[in-house]
Image (spheres, grey):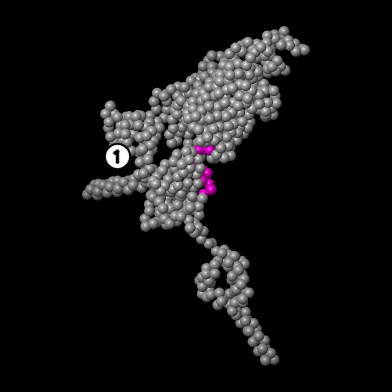
Amino acid sequence: MKTVKLILLLMLTDMVVAQDGSILPGQKKAIMTMAQSSGYSTEQWNSYLTQEYGKGMDDLSRNEGAEIIMAFQSGTIAMRSTPVKRIGLETASLLEPGMKKLFHFQDGTIRNGEIVSIEDDLVALRTTSGTFKIPSDQFLSETADITNKRGELFKGIVLGETIEEFIIRTSYGDAIIQKRDIRTMKRFHGGVLDKKSEDRRKFYQGEAQLLNIFMDPTAFPLIGNTFYLSGLSLGYGLTDRFMLTTKFGSNFSGDLNLHPRIRFYHRKSAEKEVAATWGFGIHRSFNINSIIAKYSHAINLTDIDDNVKTLEQSDFDADDIVKSSAENTLYAETFLVFSSRSVNPTGRGKMGWSAGAKVSNAFVNRSTWLKNSIANPDSSYDLSWSSDVKYKVPFRCWLSLEYDLRTNLKFVGSAWIDNGYKTTKLSQTIGDYLGTDGTPAFSLDSPRGEASMIDFDFGMLYAVNDNFRVGVHFQQPYIDFYWEFFEF
Amino acid sequence: MCWRILNSMKKTLFIAISISTLLMGQISSDLITVRDIRLDNLKRDYSGKAIRFVDSKSVSNKGILLDVTDENIIISKSGSPVPFNHSKIKYVFIDPKKKELAMVIGLTALGGISGYLGVMLGKSDANNTTKGVTSSITAGLAGIVGHRAFYKPIKIDISGKTYD
């Protein structure tokens, strides 16, 4: 009996001892697989084992092996946080006390702060979260490739950036490049292209520089040698202060027209740009029906009982009331507009306004165009222009606003006083533009709509790319689109 | 005895503050080349125009810009050229003139006319008082906006500062 007990004890002891023998090959394989998937290299893992167990992989016991496997499975041995150091990133070659901007670092972090001092290659960077002492080799270089609108290409270290300009140290000296002159820019941090080349939270100005807000001009004309094409007109900037446009829809219907615009006053500083422009337009053969249609609410129809209603309220069209002998007329208009653009205090682009007024000769000889009377099966009417003082002269005054939301998105709004304005529905506007309502195509001169002499509109303008812009708003023409081709 | 100690402390404090200020003043990212470019631009764009700046003695100077050399800004004061060392001048101002005043007046008139026309279109039976008051208010508002937009001096940075 004693012998049996002794044998059992020996077997048990052997079993227990056998459990803590050398690590099994299967355990080693499992551990190495898990170590690698946790981000450890062989060297790093050996170093870990030496630190934790004081021995190498082959010297571990089975129990230790099992313990390590369980530790991996339970997450006690965490994923190794591999240093994010991006090998090969260029370090900043120029750091100076007083530099204040967004700094990019080797470990991928970005901090906004000011360099307070540099001692023994240790940079003291003051941020709103505290002052950090960072080795200078952790600061990434900041370089840029900039092409301006004249086609010049600059490559170099970005020394600085102000509201208006970039300062670049090129191989041949320092260059100051005005942001407004930049056509394309690639910015590199540590030699790696930063796809968000410009800080999204702060930018100098939106990509779209507006010539018009909806249908009203601003005081900033096209820059020299720039071609412009929209759905209604095309134009060219002959100089930085003089441009010409023409409404091609009217040209195709025999009404040749030109609209010169000259900026006679301009002042620009780092934060603000102001200008004043006057322009005029001349049409050699303007369609009288367009004038009648536009001012149909100013034409009175008086029946035999002296009841008065306007042409707009009747079922007659412009064609019905115009004398057959009336010919198209020479039409001229002139406008004056003041504009201002200034840097948004938030640093996000610019905001601006334009205020202007326009008058035309549309009412000259107007009394000779109308028939004396017109009849329908129900009644006959005497025709006359309204004698109300507000219809003495055709005019329009406007106040427009623009606001950069992002570099490629602008909010625009406008309010106006116009004694000839009519609001039309989208379907009417499309018909008018395409000419399906009997008026010339590619122009907006519909006789339809409802008079709305004091009104407003707002919408968004999106810069699809450097050349093409598209806008959406809530009054006719509802959709704006145009192309600008620089150095055309 | 106490007064002497106090005076001595004051002196020490004063000297310490002065030295600190001087040292702080040195902490800047001014670049000579950047400054040179800006001075060249000033000469190119504003020669022959009236400028104003505050010199190193905190005195405001005004005159026609004649030349910008490596060390001086030369302006014409009372018909004779006067050089000013520009090492301590950070900004030069161009003050508004008659043209700017004309812009303000133009915008004021536009505001007044718009107000008048707005009343005319919006309220056919408006009396002269309403028209007068409205157009005066809109003219006044347009005048204020115009003054702020057009009648402000232009500030030209001629420092070597590279960061805002």
- Residue B4 seen: yes
Majority secondary structure of the magenta segment? Answer: loop
A225 or B96, which lies in front?
Answer: A225
Residue underneath mark 1: B71
Residue range in magenta is A194-208
Give how far across and how far down residue B27 sits, in percent: 36, 47
Q: Residues within 10 Å of mark 1 (few under 14, many from 20)?
A: few
Give how far across and how far down residue A181 sits, in percent: 47, 38
- Where on the picture, by quarter, is residue A68? bottom right
Report in which chain the residue with disc 1 lies.
B
B116 horizontally vs A312: left or right: left
In the image, residue A217 sits, relative to residue A13, either above or below, namely above
A377 or A10, which lies in front?
Answer: A377
Q: What element carries label 1?
A: loop
- Where on the picture, by quarter, is residue B87? top left
Give how far across and how far down residue B63 sits, in percent: 32, 29
Residue at horizontal 40 percent and vertical 51 percent from the top: A94
Residue at horizontal 72 percent and vertical 17 percent from the top: A315
In the image, residue A189 sits, relative to residue A259, either above or below, namely below
A9 or A102, which lies in front?
Answer: A102
Residue at horizontal 32 percent and vertical 46 percent from the top: B21
Give how far across and how far down residue A387 sits, in percent: 61, 11
Residue at horizontal 68 percent and vertical 26 percent from the top: A435
